[in-house]
Image (spheres, rainbow, N blue to C red):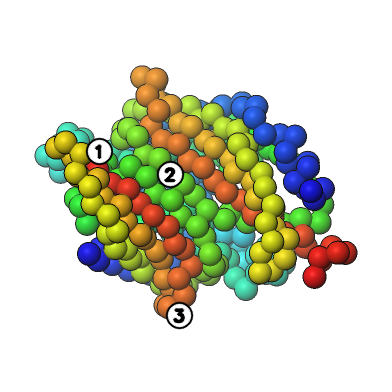
């Protein structure tokens, strides 16, 4: 087992401090704008009222932007991953994948609480060498106690310099 | 059955900076060219989540209801840099009837203007 995998494995399980988001129409519209998505469902009250949703809802995968944050500052690294697990020197990480479970629509006025934990860490031999994967699960619950979304983010880590013994 | 493709782009640094703010995920390699280059990257990198979000838009545009999408699972297989044009695609792999609901399973992907498939995955919808 590599040093990084052993290190990450110690963090599997416990939940970190929750992150709280207050969702408003501006944050929903801005997410759609960043995606160059002109869909009126995300910005036009009059149109949205005529749909089955009877009002604006958020685009799939959205759960809050920088202005939605309530208990941490925008730019705080915990908004990317509240697990805040230190990565050992000599390793670099990238986002390797996302798995979104979309359960309940998110609407303006919702307060979402994100609970997050590291659920898995494992190693694989890739084409570019030895890789370590870590899977973080975020569970977003609204003010009614409904789980709105579960996001599992997989990160991949590789050594910045080849380690002895790996070719 | 093919899902109608959706093309976005070119996706510029400003879109990536907006997306960082729109998701509250500020990671410098996505909007700071000097920082990205200092890390050995060719330019700023389009967020993986951006690709998943445009796959979701394709599916919503196709079925007319984003809440029909129950799950999207995407692997990021290659980097896309600012200035790239991305086209999402997909095809239906299985349809099953459960009572009055139809469950639809799809393969989905994102290709750039060089025909590189930089994200691949699956989606589940209930209609």
Q: Out of A32 and B116, give the one closest to the viewer.
A: B116
Q: Does A71 appear above or below A1? A: above
Q: CA distance from mark 3 to mark 1?
A: 36 Å
Q: Which of labels 1 and 2 is toward the front?
A: 2
At 52% from the left edge and 53% from the top edge, which residue is drawn? A97
Return the mark for residue A56.
1
Query: Can I make out residue B19 in this image?
Result: no
Tell me the tag on residue A114. none
**Image quadrant of residue B59?**
bottom left
Measured along the vertical axis of the image, is residue A23 above or below residue B46?
A: above
Query: Which residue is tagged 2?
Result: A100
Q: CA distance from mark 2 to mark 3?
A: 27 Å
Graded by Cα atoms within 10 Å as few (under 14), some (14 to 19) or many (20 or more), the crowding at tag 2 reads many
Under tag 2, what secondary structure?
strand
Q: Gap in Å between the C-alphas at discs 1 and 2?
A: 21 Å
Marks 1 & 2 on one chain: yes
Image coordinates of residue A163 in percent, x first then y, are 84, 63
SS for callout 1: loop
Host chain of mark 3: B
Percent from the top left, x then y, of residue B75? 50, 57
Instruction: Assess whether mark 3 and mark 2 are in contact (beta carbons under 8 angstroms).
Output: no
Q: Residue at 37%, 24% (x, y): give it.
A: A146
Name the chain under label 2.
Answer: A
Say which of marks 3 and 1 sits in front: 3
Closer to the eye: label 2 or 3? 2
């Amino acid at each position: 087992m590599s040093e990084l995998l052993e290190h990450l494995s110690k963090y599997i399980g416990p939940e970190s401090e929750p992150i709280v988001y207050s969702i408003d129409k501006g944050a929903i519209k801005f997410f759609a704008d960043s995606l160059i998505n002109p869909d009126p469902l995300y910005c036009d009250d009059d149109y949205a009222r005529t749909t089955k949703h009877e009002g604006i809802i958020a685009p799939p995968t959205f759960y809050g932007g920088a202005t939605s944050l309530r208990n941490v500052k925008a730019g705080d690294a915990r908004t990317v991953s509240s697990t805040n697990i230190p990565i050992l020197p000599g390793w670099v990480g990238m986002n390797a994948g996302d798995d979104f479970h979309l359960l309940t629509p998110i609407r303006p006025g919702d307060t979402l609480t994100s609970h997050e934990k590291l659920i898995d860490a494992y190693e694989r031999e890739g084409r570019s060498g030895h890789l370590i994967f870590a899977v973080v699960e975020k569970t977003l619950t609204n003010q009614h106690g409904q789980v709105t979304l579960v996001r599992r983010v997989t990160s991949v880590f590789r050594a910045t310099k080849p380690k002895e013994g790996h070719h | 059955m093919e899902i109608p493709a959706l093309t976005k782009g070119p996706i510029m640094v400003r879109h990536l900076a907006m997306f960082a703010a729109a998701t509250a995920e500020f990671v410098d390699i996505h909007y700071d060219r000097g920082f990205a280059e200092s890390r050995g990257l060719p330019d700023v990198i389009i967020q993986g989540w951006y690709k998943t979000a445009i796959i979701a838009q394709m599916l919503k545009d196709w079925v007319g209801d984003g809440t029909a999408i129950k799950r999207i699972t995407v692997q990021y297989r290659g980097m896309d840099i600012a200035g790239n044009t991305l086209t999402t695609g997909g095809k239906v792999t299985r349809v099953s009837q459960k009572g009055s609901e139809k469950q639809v399973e799809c393969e989905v992907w994102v290709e750039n203007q060089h025909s590189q498939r930089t994200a691949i995955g699956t989606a589940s919808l209930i209609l």
